[in-house]
């Protein structure tokens, strides 16, 4: 792993892409709007990127449609799509240093996470979906004598993907890889806070052999470029990851335009339930820290509610706080840093607002302050509130920052009740050495993923998504392919 100085030097020499990528090349946008990219660790200006608007979205959708009709990707031999996506996976691996730097510089993610986590994971996702292209079979449905009912899966056409800033490159792969593997053309809109790595992805895809127009990237603001995609009459499917509030807007855009299917991966307020019979409380405390403070708490499945059985509550909280006090804040490009900056000033203000709210609702056990590193940056201390009522705002709202609410419980039934008492249902963790309890409790937790004696269980073959206001549809796994293709029946009467 390079040192902080080496990463900073490489960052200073990075080349940035700044234009929408449409029809196989960077193009001048129709308007003059821009996105200013600021390094949240230093507050320094990094670069400027064009903010695409409705006209650019229209152009990208037209280009995607034309490519889809031409068939060089949509009707390509599956083995050809496979080889192309495998080449893309390899190019991502080879570009890991550059891509990791783009994400870390752009939104403050630790370089250790992006370089050893996000980017290799995204390469795995491209590889995994590449391998599905020539292993996905059609069906023959039961029919009467003299008839043959063939059921094939067809790509939908133009898929739009709108994604957030917390895992810029890897979440792009979660949408783009299965949509391309299924034979669609894609228009990707990265979050305005993190456009850099998505623009580079478009180039890498072209280098791998993805035909012009099959993957287009339009950086831009949500209300303009995002909304234009949501309302576009020629977009066949929209895959969204982001907040539940904006997810609901996409349902409206669809109902007011062409009824395109909309898939939503939205927010969470996930519980981490620690029972007194956990085998290793130190491990549980260690992982509870990671579960909430990873990526500065800007994780949809962040375990931001920690439910602790009353009989071990004080002991467990003291083990937890010891660890929280040891978390070193610092430059996200320093491999020794344990927590970096939040994405920007807006998010920082939002998180500080919730911390203020929490001071009136619960006991502030540690943290709670903004700190300056080298004189600036968007840093907030890892913050823990104890004796939190589950009905309080800090236990119900998704803060999306390094803030943990610790909630005591008396027994298993109460733990389940509190865990499920939320409008979200994305993820949950639980710690116990009792197998029966593990199975019983996980079956009753209303969450898309339950991690037992672990946290943040995730990987390309594992479906990821939620219940309730966490959305619907699943990213990753073979289930994701179902979102980007439709069964088509061809009924042949042969007499
Ligand atoms: P956000 O909802 O503000 O933005 C997400 C995307 O939607 C961005 O590309 C943005 O430009 C666009 N957008 C914003 N307003 C829009 C509008 N009015 N019309 C159309 N598009 C619009 O979310 P964020 O702040 O970027 O990300 C944080 C949220 O994402 C959190 O709620 C988090 O839980 C969620 N998230 C969910 C998952 C998951 O898989 N469930 C993963 C990561 C993040």
Image (cartoon, helix red, strand yellow):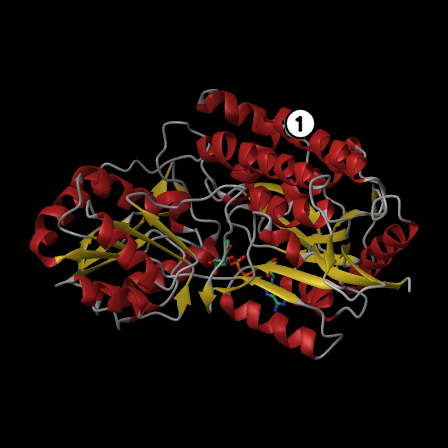
Is the CB of mark 1 within 8 Å of ligand 1? no
Q: Tell me the crowding category of disc 1: few under 14, some 14 to 19, or many 20 or more residues within 10 angstroms, Cα based.
A: some
Residue 162 place in picture, x, y as percent? 64, 57
Residue at left offset 18%, top offset 38%:
282
Instruction: Determine the image quadrant of residue 392.
Output: bottom left
Q: Is residue 102 visible?
A: no
Residue 38 place in picture, x, y as percent? 55, 45
Q: How many marks?
A: 1
* Depth check, front residue: 21 or 429: 429
The residue carrying mark 1 is 90
* 234 sits to left or right of 361: right
Label 1 sits on a secondary structure element that is helix
Residue at left offset 41%, top offset 44%:
457
Residue 249 place in picture, x, y as percent? 60, 73
* 369 sits to left or right of 335: left
In the image, is residue 389 above or below residue 16?
A: below
Residue 332 place in picture, x, y as percent? 44, 35
* 378 sits to left or right of 324: right
Instruction: Determine the image quadrant of residue 160.
Output: bottom right
Ligand 1 image position (quadrant) = bottom right
Instruction: Determine the image quadrant of residue 394.
Output: bottom left
Residue at left offset 63%, top offset 63%:
222
Screen quadrant of the C terminus: bottom right
Residue at left offset 52%, top offset 27%:
8
Outermost residue to the bottom: 256
In the image, is residue 259 above or below residue 128?
A: below
* 45 sits to left or right of 298: right
């Amino acid at each position: 792993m390079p040192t902080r100085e080496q990463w900073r030097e490489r960052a200073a020499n990075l080349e940035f892409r700044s234009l929408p990528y449409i029809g196989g090349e960077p193009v001048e946008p129709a308007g003059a709007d821009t996105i200013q990219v600021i390094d949240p660790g230093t507050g320094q200006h990094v670069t400027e990127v064009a903010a695409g608007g409705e006209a650019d979205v229209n152009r990208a959708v037209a280009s995607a449609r034309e490519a889809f009709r031409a068939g060089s990707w949509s009707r390509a031999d599956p083995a050809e799509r496979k080889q192309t996506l495998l080449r893309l996976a390899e190019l991502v691996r080879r570009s890991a240093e550059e891509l990791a730097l783009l994400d870390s510089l752009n939104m403050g993610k630790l370089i250790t996470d992006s370089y050893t986590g996000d980017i290799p994971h995204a390469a795995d996702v491209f590889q995994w979906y590449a391998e599905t292209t020539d292993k996905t079979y059609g069906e023959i449905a039961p029919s009467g004598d003299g008839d043959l009912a063939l059921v094939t899966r067809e790509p939908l056409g133009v898929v739009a993907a709108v994604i957030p800033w917390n895992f810029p490159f890897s979440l792009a792969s979660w949408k783009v890889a299965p949509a391309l593997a299924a034979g669609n053309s894609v228009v990707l809109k990265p979050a305005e806070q993190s456009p850099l790595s998505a623009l580079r992805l478009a180039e890498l895809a072209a280098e791998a052999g993805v035909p012009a127009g099959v993957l287009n990237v339009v950086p831009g603001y949500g209300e303009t470029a995002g909304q234009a995609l949501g309302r576009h009459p020629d977009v066949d499917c929209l895959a969204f990851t982001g907040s539940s509030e904006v997810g609901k807007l996409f349902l409206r855009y669809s109902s007011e335009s062409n009824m395109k299917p909309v898939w939503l991966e939205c927010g969470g307020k996930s519980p981490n339930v620690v029972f007194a019979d956990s085998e290793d409380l130190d491990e549980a405390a260690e992982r509870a820290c990671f579960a909430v403070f990873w990526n500065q708490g800007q994780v949809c499945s962040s375990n931001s509610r920690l439910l602790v059985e009353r009989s071990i509550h004080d002991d467990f909280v003291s083990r937890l706080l010891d660890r929280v006090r040891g978390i070193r804040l610092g430059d996200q490009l320093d491999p020794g840093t344990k927590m970096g900056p939040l994405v920007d000033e807006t998010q920082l203000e939002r998180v500080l607002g919730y911390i203020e709210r929490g001071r009136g609702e619960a006991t502030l056990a540690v943290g709670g302050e903004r700190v300056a590193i080298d004189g600036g940056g968007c840093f907030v201390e890892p913050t823990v509130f104890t004796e939190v009522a589950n009905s309080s705002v800090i236990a119900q709202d998704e803060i999306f920052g390094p803030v943990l609410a610790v909630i005591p419980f008396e027994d298993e039934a109460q733990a389940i009740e509190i865990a499920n008492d939320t409008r979200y249902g994305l993820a949950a963790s639980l710690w116990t050495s009792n197998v029966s309890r593990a199975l019983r409790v996980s079956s009753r937790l209303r969450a898309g993923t339950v991690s037992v004696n672990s946290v943040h269980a995730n990987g390309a073959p594992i479906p990821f998504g939620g219940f309730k206001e966490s959305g619907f549809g699943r990213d990753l796994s073979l289930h994701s392919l179902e979102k980007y293709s439709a069964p088509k029946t061809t009924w042949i009467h042969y007499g």
